[in-house]
Amino acid sequence: MYTKDQLPSEAQIRKYLRRILFGKNVFCPECRSRRISVQSGRYRCKDCRIRFSLLSHSWLSNIKIPLQKWWMVLWCWVCQVPVKQTMALTGLSKVSVTKWFDTFRGHLPEETHILERVVQLDEAYFKNMTLIMAKQKGTRNLAYDVLIGTSV
């Protein structure tokens, strides 16, 4: 469990986010140029002359809570802390906490399993759906799909 002393500072969180969003070098989100000038925390592309900030062209562009509270909500979501306990820890309302949990859930990467070479395939039929599962032979790689209906 985090305490106030263990939370990263605002600058550290910005550093983490910059590394995650841009990698080693900051680039323009419009033209992908690395010719960027920085003035008081805002960036400006020298090629297309667009101005942007760290989060302005990402899914975090409309964040309205301090980054430390956002970090705490993210930590609670990752650790599967219940909504009421997250509300008590962060001081946010139930609407805010559930909105952020839904946002985090919505931005999870799609799970794709691509199997190669020889696979073993099986299906299972239920009332109105079919489960198809495949396993790559010699490995533990699995892929499955649930289809509505019983005709595959």
Image: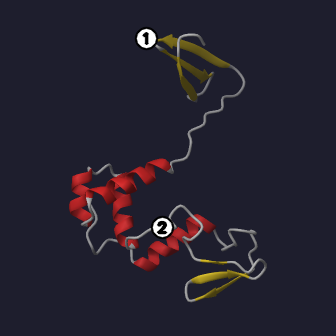
User: Measuring 57% from the left and 27% from the top, which residue is drawn there?
Assistant: 143
Q: Is residue 132 above or below residue 114?
A: above
Considering every residue shown, the one lying at the far bottom of the view is 39
Mark found first going from the N terminus, 2 or 1: 2
| Amino acid residing under circle 1 | Lys
Given residues 28 and 137, the one toward you in this image is: 28
Residue 52: quarter of image = bottom right
Where does label 2 land, which residue? 62
Q: Is residue 65 above or below residue 99?
A: below
User: Measuring 34% from the left and 61% from the top, which residue is drawn there?
Assistant: 73
Where does label 1 land, which residue? 127
Residue 64: quarter of image = bottom left
Q: Residue 118 at what x, y percent from top left?
A: 69, 20
| Amino acid residing under circle 2 | Asn
User: Measuring 25% from the left and 69% from the top, which residue is drawn there?
Assistant: 3
Q: How is the image coloured?
A: secondary structure
